[in-house]
Image (spheres, rainbow, N blue to C red):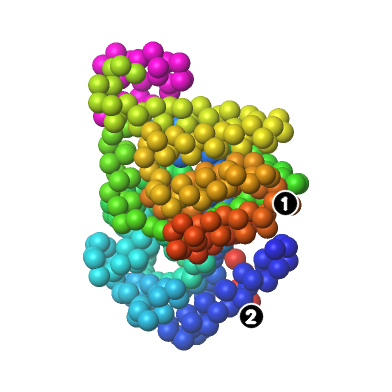
Amino acid sequence: MSAEAERGKRGMEQKKLQEKFEGLFGAGGDIRGYFSPGRVNLIGEHTDYNGGHVFPCALTIGTYGIARKREDSKIRFYSLNMEDRPPMEADLSDLSYREEYGWANYPLGVVWAMKKVKGLTPGTGFDMAVYGNIPNGSGLSSSASLEVLTGVIVRDLFGFDSLTNIDLALVGQYSENNFNGCNCGIMDQFAVAMGKKDAAIFLDCSDLSYEYAPIALPDAKILITNSKVKHSLVDSAYNDRREECARALSMLQVELDIEALGELSQEEFEEHADLIWDPVCRRRAKHAVYENQRTIRAVEALKSGQIEMFGQLMNASHISLRDDYEVSCREVDILVDEAWKIPGVIGSRITGGGFGGCTVSLVKNDAIDPFIDWVGSAYREKTGIEAEFYAVEIGDGAGRVTLSE
């Protein structure tokens, strides 16, 4: 889709959401529009909370927001993706997690975290309506998109101008960790907040130093395949993997002066691997160390135009996530295995937290149609599920957008 077509589509989505907002909450006043992207990670999975490197990019699909300040202390959230549900209502005097709030715990958690982390509380309540076109359960970070969107809205509505986009990423991560109970790393929120058109972010999660690496693929595209499978254990298993890595680190620290697994080279890990007496924890740590080194090498390969090497490292990443970290699943493995059979596929791997969701593939332009036909057919035959395919564009991070009159 061309940039002009993309802007036109975004304008239509925003207009539809604005009309719904005004129908629910009334017209008039200072109504403002926002957009926050989803993200895909090209390589560097489950390394962020292990002090390693990641290489994500923001997408042009994401979450649209419309918001306006209120004069009282009420906060009302509405999602156009759940049209049958009425707006959820909370109050600034009681920013508590409640099961009945459902999805709205994510934006509410950001308001709570902004006070906890930054000591900032909105002076009044606000109304907020959202619409997301990130496929549900796809692993493209719809929760981080919503969290950063909320941060941008609160900063803009209430003049919290001292907050940088990195601050908003950290607030979003804190809210997901401590309000919603998923012990995620910083990658998703950082990519959403700091995305840059036509570039991926090479981020060192140990200190948040980063650089933008242009993604120049004149003869290929980034193709995302949605397995349409999301296993319910994803959040609990994510927390389990983080705990297993923490145990492995503590075993290594008996002899090594390190703060994170990401500090180790592959050679250093192999030299001291026997310190990790639990074989499961040893495999988890091996993935974290090797994946971090793969990510560093992949970015170097990309910078030097070695796109085939980048693809080989993507493939190795999937094997490690499947075998050592055990966060893949049968359906996703089928997608990757079938992709690897196709000439013109540079690399393919699972992306996101795991246990379903999406794969990300680098596919040469003349192989895109064969890829969709072959992988779609084989996946349907083996699982009975219709996969979805998206040739994605890399976009900017979250921010305010102009509403149409």
Q: Is residue 236 left or right of residue 356?
A: left
List x then y, in percent, for residue 230: 38, 57
Q: Tag on residue 86?
A: none
Label located before the other in sequence (2 or 1): 1
Q: Please tell me whether residue 270 belongs to the stretch shown in magenta.
A: yes
Range covered by the magenta-colored residues: 247-272
Which residue is rendered at x = 25% and y = 21% of the image?
Answer: 277
Which of 207/103 is in front?
A: 103
Local SS, label 2: loop
Quarter of the picture containing the N terminus is bottom right
Q: Quadrant of residue 125?
A: bottom left
Q: Tag on residue 365?
A: 1
Which residue is rendered at x = 71% and y = 68% of the image?
Answer: 5
Q: Quadrant of residue 147?
A: bottom left
Marks 2 and 1, Cα distance to the nearest angstrom?
39 Å
Q: Which residue is mark 2?
A: 405
Which residue is rendered at x = 36% and y = 40% of the image?
Answer: 326
Q: Quadrant of residue 238?
A: top left
Which of 400/40 is in front?
A: 40
List x then y, in percent, for residue 166: 49, 46
Of tags 2 and 1, the one toward the viewer is: 1
Residue kind at label 1, given as amino acid type: Asn
List x then y, in percent, for residue 53: 49, 33
Q: Is residue 369 left or right of residue 277?
A: right
Residue kind at label 2, given as amino acid type: Glu
Which of 319/125 is in front?
A: 319
List x then y, in percent, for residue 161: 50, 54
